[in-house]
Amino acid sequence: MTTPEARRPTPGARNAQADLEQSLQEIADRLNPRHLAADAAGATRQAIADAGNAVTGKGLPTDSPSRARNVKVLFAAGAATTAAVLWSTLRRRS
């Protein structure tokens, strides 16, 4: 038969449990749809600002490869959209 003392978690086990709970809460916060949407909106705003700088001759961001990539993706999406609209317009006229 176990004693009540044997069933109590040790201080190390309590610390491990607290660390695990904190890690799980951080993961849940990162995966929260509102948090993800806010991050995406912020990255989009930054990409638009960076694209404006690139168009006005200030170049792509050199301090962040991901920001430079986002500008390139934004330019590619714009080019693809323009091509699709042009193709659709020309196709209707034929």
Image: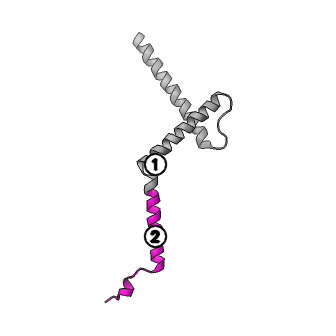
- The amino acid type found where label 1 is placed reads His
How packed mark 1 is, by other alpha carbons closer than 10 Å (few <14, some 14-19, many 20 or more), is few
Residue for point 46% across, 53% down? 30
Q: Position of residue 38 (x, y in %)?
A: 48, 44
Which secondary structure lies at badge 2?
Answer: helix
Residue 16 is one of the magenta-drawn residues = yes
Residue 47 is one of the magenta-drawn residues = no
**For residue 21, above or below residue 40:** below
* Farthest residue, direction left: 1
Say whether residue 71 is left or right of residue 28.
right
Label 2: which residue? Answer: 18
* Farthest residue, direction top: 94
- The amino acid type found where label 2 is placed reads Ala
Residue for point 47% across, 79% down? 11
Residue 77's label in the rendered image is: none
Label 1: which residue? Answer: 35
- Examine the image and state in which quarter residue 17 appears: bottom left
Q: Position of residue 66 (x, y in %)?
A: 58, 43
Cα distance in 3D space between marks 1 and 2: 24 Å
Which secondary structure lies at badge 1?
Answer: helix
Residue for point 49% across, 40% down? 41
Q: Position of residue 52 (x, y in %)?
A: 61, 30
Image coloring type: one colour
Quarter that holds the C terminus? top left
Please provide the residue range marked out in magenta: 1-27
**For residue 86, above or below residue 16:** above
How packed mark 2 is, by other alpha carbons closer than 10 Å (few <14, some 14-19, many 20 or more), is few
Of label 1 and label 2, which has the lower sequence position?
2
